[in-house]
Image: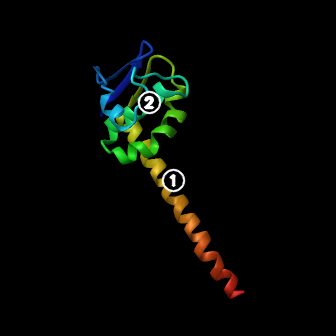
Amino acid sequence: MAVYEGKNAHRVSRDGVPLDFRRSLKVRNHSPTGFSWGYGGSGPSQLALALLLDVLDDEVTAKRWYQRFMRAFVAQWKDGWTITSETILQLISRWEQDTTLQVISRWQQEYEEPSRDTQA
């Protein structure tokens, strides 16, 4: 389990080692000057993307969720924040499950409701 920390306004580390944001820049260049947090903007978006890429190692899933992660978490953080890879994995898993359940629910409503009308 990795521990991510942010302090001194722009310094982010993973297990005490500075987190490199270059990989996230190749996926989406929000903030070429680096990470930030505590508001909704380009620096927090870059941080959210970098964290999800690092934890998930899956570009498609990271791109799907990083803006929601930024708004729900990164934009709310104050200096001195920490989050674990386990917490991020649990969160993304929950969001994926909720999305799947919503799709199933919509499908059921679309395809089961007409059959009820024909039976009446």
Q: Which residue lies furthest to the left in this view?
A: 17
Numbered disc 1: secondary structure = helix
What crowding class fits label 2: few (fewer than 14 Cα within 10 Å), some (14-19), or many (20 or more)? Answer: some
**Residue 98: image location, x then y, percent:** 51, 53
Q: Residue furthest right?
A: 120
Q: Please, what is the three-letter code of the amino acid marked with disc 2?
A: His
Q: Residue at x 35, y 31 (%)?
A: 25
Left or right: where does residue 102 sit relative to residue 50? right
Residue 98's disc is 1
For the C terminus, the image quarter is bottom right
Q: Which residue is drawn at 30% across and 25% down?
A: 20
What crowding class fits label 1: few (fewer than 14 Cα within 10 Å), some (14-19), or many (20 or more)? Answer: few
Q: Residue furthest bottom?
A: 119
Q: Where is 92 relative to 50, above or below?
A: below
Q: Mark 2 points at which residue?
A: 30
Q: Which residue is drawn at 46% across and 25% down?
A: 43
Q: Residue at x 48, y 48 (%)?
A: 95
Q: In which quarter of the image is residue 109?
A: bottom right
Q: How far apart are marks 1 and 2 (CA)?
A: 27 Å
Q: Sequence order check: which comes first, mark 1 or mark 2?
A: 2
Q: 34 or 73: which is nearer to us?
A: 34
Q: Please, what is the three-letter code of the amino acid marked with disc 1?
A: Asp
Residue 73's disc is none
Circle 1/circle 2 CB separation < 8 Å? no
Q: Where is 114 relative to 101, above or below?
A: below
Q: Where is 5 relative to 27, above or below?
A: above
**Residue 116: image location, x then y, percent:** 66, 81
Left or right: where does residue 115 sit relative to residue 102? right
Numbered disc 2: secondary structure = loop
